Every structure is written in structure tokens, then in C-alpha cells.
Image (cartoon, helix red, strand yellow):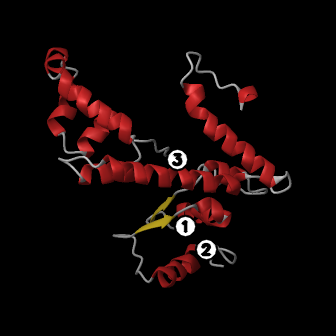
Amino acid sequence: MLFDADLSVERLIPALSIESGTRITPEDTLVIFDEVQEVPRAMTSLKMFNEAAPEYDVLATGSALGIAMHPGFSFPVGKVSRLKLYPMSFVEFLYACKQYALAEMLESKDSPLINVMHDRVMTWLRYFMYTGGMPEIVEAFASTLPNPDFTAVRKLQNSLVSDYRDDFSKHVDMRDSPAVTTLRLNQVWDSIPSQLAKENKKFVYGVV
């Protein structure tokens, strides 16, 4: 494996270049380690890049839970800048759908104008509430405008939910009845809509 041996940048850069089929140069290459929790030593290598080759731009994406579950994993403290990504906000959704004037109006907090445009704002808010803020789904929705295709959106949403379910088993301690734990995780997941629909939003595990 690429990261099983020496983690020096002098070895990693040529190896990554060969593996990716891309020439890696500090000036115009962004190196991305996707799902880095699957190879903890890839995360460890970020310390080497920070100390020995800060001229390279390196980005790692992954699950913090996945990283935490690797026993003996050493996080490069002080060598990595963390950035949490969230679903798009309503204003970001409007920008993605090229509703620039509407987005700028909301950002301006111009209450009189917002009141005048109330119906239009509500139309797009309904679109946003149906679509959600996940980038791939928003992109798919925006590509169908000006005639929104909600069927295509729902298909992608269902696919994403299935991916989440498939991911549950990756975060189960194999020493603790993985099948039972995965089933329990799915039951918790399935109960979220009904629990959110209650007046009291507190999640009650006893009803799962």
C-alpha cells in the first residue's frame, strides 16, 4: 500500500503522481485524500507535508467518527486546519439556482421589499424545503429549472439515504454484535421523522 512505507514527502509525491497519472507541482496541483479515515496513515502524512513541504496544497476529506474508531490512530495536532462542511443554507440554495436578486435581497434584510416579494420568497422556500441543501441534489434540481423536476430530486434523495444506511455498518465495532448494532442504528434512523414531528423535539431512545 502507498502509505504503508516511508511517509516522507520525497517518496510520496512521486508515488502519488504515478498512482494518479498526474504530474504534481506545488504551483497548480491540489492533492486530495478522499475518505481519509479508511487509510489513517494518509492523515498522518499531513504532518510531513506541513513540516517538510508546506508549498504543497493538500486537502483531506472524511468522517471524524471513522477516524476516531481506529485504535492507535494519531491525529496530526496543530498541523491541520479543520473545516466543517454543512448543507447549503437557503441563501446559498438561491445562488445555486441563479436567483441572485432574491438572495441579495434576503442578505440585505430589506424588510419592506421582502414583504412585497413574500409570495416569491415562499415559493422558493418550498423548493428549498423539498430539495434540502445537499450540493449534488441542489445541482440536479437547478439543472431542471425553469421547470422543476421533483421526481429526479426524490430519486437522488432516496439514493443518498441508501448510502447513509450502507455507511452505518462501517462505524460498528466488530467486537460488539455488528448485525444487532447495525439494525439498531437503522431503527434510530427510521424514528427520526416521527420524533421530529412531536411538539417536544427531544429524541427519546425508549420509543425506538
Q: Secondary structure at mark 2?
A: loop
Disc 2 residue type (three-letter) = Ser
Most foreground residue, 68 or 162? 162
Choose the circle earlier in sequence order: 1 or 2.
2
Tell me the tag on residue 3. Answer: none
Choose the circle earlier in sequence order: 3 or 1.
1
Residue occupying image coordinates x 37% and y 38%: 130
Q: Secondary structure at mark 1?
A: helix
**The C terminus lies in quadrant:** top right
Which residue lies under the disc numbered 2?
8
Please report contact status of discs 3 and 2: CB closer than 8 Å, yes or no. no
Residue occupying image coordinates x 25% and y 46%: 148
Disc 1 residue type (three-letter) = Ala
Instruction: Examine the image and state in which quarter residue 50 appears.
Output: bottom right
Q: Secondary structure at mark 3?
A: loop
Most foreground residue, 50 or 99? 99
**The N terminus lies in quadrant:** bottom right
Tell me if residue 58 comes above or below residue 69 in the rendering. below
Which residue lies under the disc numbered 3?
82
Residue occupying image coordinates x 67% and y 45%: 186
On screen, residue 25 versus residue 119, left or right, reads: right
Which residue lies under the disc numbered 1?
52
Please report contact status of discs 1 and 2: CB closer than 8 Å, yes or no. yes
Most foreground residue, 200 or 41? 200
**Residues packed near mark 3 inside 10 Å, few (<14), some (14 to 19) or many (20 plus):** few
Residue occupying image coordinates x 37% and y 34%: 129
Q: Nearer the viewer, mark 3 or mark 2?
A: 3
